[in-house]
Image (cartoon, rainbow, N blue to C red):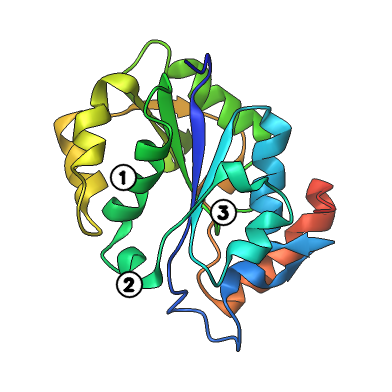
């Protein structure tokens, strides 16, 4: 059994709100890409990492993580919703003591915030990172919620789960826990912030 929770990076969406010619996760950010930077932050936390992605994005994920740390699902499976994607990640690491869910489009979430959620998960069933009282990501779940996580369906399954098991909020100094890249404006803002954060990618 893994001694530490696994960070499940969810990178299987269609990027429908992004207006660029290619997927938002492969857009350049610093010396890397949006997904590459997200994964680099997870790697720096030294927690186990698992990426759930699609064939189109597999090459990008493979730049950072080994094949054994990827779950590649067909796009039509990913289109069933976030719940299905999360369940695929949990199923791939069923004996972990817990799982931290982190969207692949959140490259500004730093390793300290990831570690803070992992630490709190030792005492709580569900944990969420928050900044100035606003809740963001990652969201952590203990191993006791395995069955519920495996039963997730659709895009609102996680919300329903958190309604049944209210998450303990962990206050972090990292505003990146609230920031995701959905639009070109978000990407421009992230690019402006990367030098100040010292992220080379």
**Residue 76 got which mark?**
2
Helix, strand or loop at label 2? It is helix
- Residue 132 left/right relative to 76: right
Q: Residue at x 74, y 56 (%)?
A: 63
- Give the mark, 2 or 3, whose residue is nearer the N terminus: 2
Q: Name the outermost residue toward the top.
A: 123
Helix, strand or loop at label 1? It is helix
**Image coordinates for residue 73, horizontal then vertical, percent:** 42, 60
Report how many numbered discs are placed on residues in the image: 3
**Image coordinates for residue 142, horizontal then vertical, percent:** 34, 22
**Image coordinates for residue 191, horizontal then vertical, percent:** 74, 66
Residue 122 visible: yes
Residue 162 visible: no
Q: Name the outermost residue toward the front.
A: 68
Question: Badge 3, how many Cα within 10 Å: few under 14, some, many 20+?
Answer: many
- Give the mark, 1 or 3, whose residue is nearer the N terminus: 1
- Residue 2 left/right relative to 89: right
Question: Badge 2, how many Cα within 10 Å: few under 14, some, many 20+?
Answer: few
| CA distance for labels 2 and 1 | 15 Å
**Residue 87 got which mark?**
1
**Of discs 1 and 3, which sits in the foreground?**
1
Circles 2, 3 touching at the beta carbon (< 8 Å):
no
132 to 170, vertically: above or below: below
**Of discs 2 and 3, which sits in the foreground?**
2
17 to 132, vertically: above or below: below
| CA distance for labels 1 and 3 | 20 Å
- Give the mark, 2 or 1, whose residue is nearer the N terminus: 2
103 to 112, vertically: above or below: below
132 to 65, vertically: above or below: above
**Residue 106 got which mark?**
3
Which residue is nearer to you in this view: 13 or 138?
Answer: 13
């Amino acid at each position: 059994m893994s001694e530490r929770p696994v960070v499940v990076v969810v990178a299987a969406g269609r990027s429908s709100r992004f207006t660029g010619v290619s997927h938002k996760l492969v857009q350049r950010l610093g010396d890397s890409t949006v997904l590459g930077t997200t994964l680099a932050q997870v790697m720096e936390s030294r927690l186990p990492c698992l990426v759930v992605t699609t064939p189109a994005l597999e090459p990008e994920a493979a730049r950072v993580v080994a094949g054994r740390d990827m779950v590649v699902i067909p796009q039509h499976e990913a289109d069933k919703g976030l719940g299905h994607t999360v369940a695929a990640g949990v199923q791939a690491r069923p004996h972990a003591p817990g799982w931290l869910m982190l969207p692949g489009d959140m490259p500004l979430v730093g390793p300290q915030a990831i570690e803070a959620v992992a630490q709190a998960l030792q005492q709580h069933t569900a944990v969420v990172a928050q900044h100035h009282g606003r809740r963001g990501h990652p969201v952590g779940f203990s191993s006791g919620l395995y069955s519920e996580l495996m039963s997730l369906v659709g895009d609102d399954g996680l919300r329903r789960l958190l309604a049944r098991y209210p998450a303990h909020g962990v206050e972090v100094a990292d505003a990146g826990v609230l920031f995701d890249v959905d639009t070109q404006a978000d990407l421009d803002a992230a690019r402006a912030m990367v030098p100040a954060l010292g992220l080379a990618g």
